Amino acid sequence: MTAMLASVNSLAEALLVEAAAVDIIDLKQPARGALGALDVAEVAEIVRRLQPGSCVSATIGDLPMQPELVLPAVQAMAATGVNYVKIGFFPGGDWLACVEGLQAIAARGVALVAVLFADTRPDFAMIDALAQAGFRGVMLDTANKQLGSLTRLMTLDELQLFVDRVAGLGLLSGLAGSLRADDVAGLVQLGPDYLGFRGALCREHSRTAQLDVGQIDIIRQHWRALAY
């Protein structure tokens, strides 16, 4: 069954979604960008305060694809004890050098998740290189939130191709990007390992606003409905 990921920007929000039995608690700061990062010390404190069995991921920020920036950020975030470190593959920079450097980190047991952005029309052939480098998963998200949701930027057929390619390489697949409750049923049919949410869980559907318990429950209800 497809899992639910909820992005949170504080300890209070992390405890809130943990209590709501969300499958993956994703630590990031939306006010700092598509994959804005929380401070490493704050991430470490959140991990320490959550239940040992909670699954936690964290982003490293909207960094340019330069190894001298990406690699230290990944190492620092991995040291906090999160289960997964998410790295956004933004346009430009040196993707190959970053992947080569990250391969050594992955070889040490750090679970890396690459985030590709639908609005940049990524080449899915990149997924093969990520698998060879030892990445644990690949996620498809949106960088420019003003352009609309993932389901507006890509067709269900395109998303199915992504999910199938990732799964065929034995990696975890994730879909996110301004998703709403109405997207759940259709996207779950594609078979991703998880769907990610932020804005749909917040007051007035604003990703930089506070989480709303009622909105979280609405999303969870869609999962419960699929179980019957």
Image: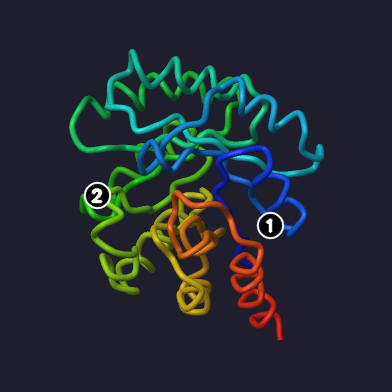
Counting from the top left corner in percent of width and height, residue 61 is at 41, 31
Front residue of 17 and 121 = 17
Where's residue 17, x and y in %?
68, 53
Q: How is the image coloured?
A: rainbow
Disc number placed over residue 140 in the picture, else none: none
Placement of the N terminus among the 4 image quadrants: bottom right
Instruction: Please say if 154 is above or below 27.
Output: below
Residue drawn at the location 45% of the way across and 29% of the way down: 60
Please determine whether, in this image, residue 77 is positioned above or below residue 6.
above
- Tag 1 secondary structure: loop
Please state if 9 lies on the left or on the right of 127 as rendered: right
* Quarter of image, res 88: top left
Mark 1 packing: few (<14 Cα in 10 Å), some, or many (20+)? some
**Residue hosting label 2:** 122
Residue shown at 21% from the left, 50% from the top: 120
27 lies left or right of 87: right
Of marks 1 and 2, which one's residue comes earlier in the chain? 1
Q: Residue at x 26, y 51 (%)?
A: 144
Q: Report which residue position mark 1 lands on.
A: 22
Mark 2 nearby-residue class (10 Å; few <14, some 14–19, many ≥20): some
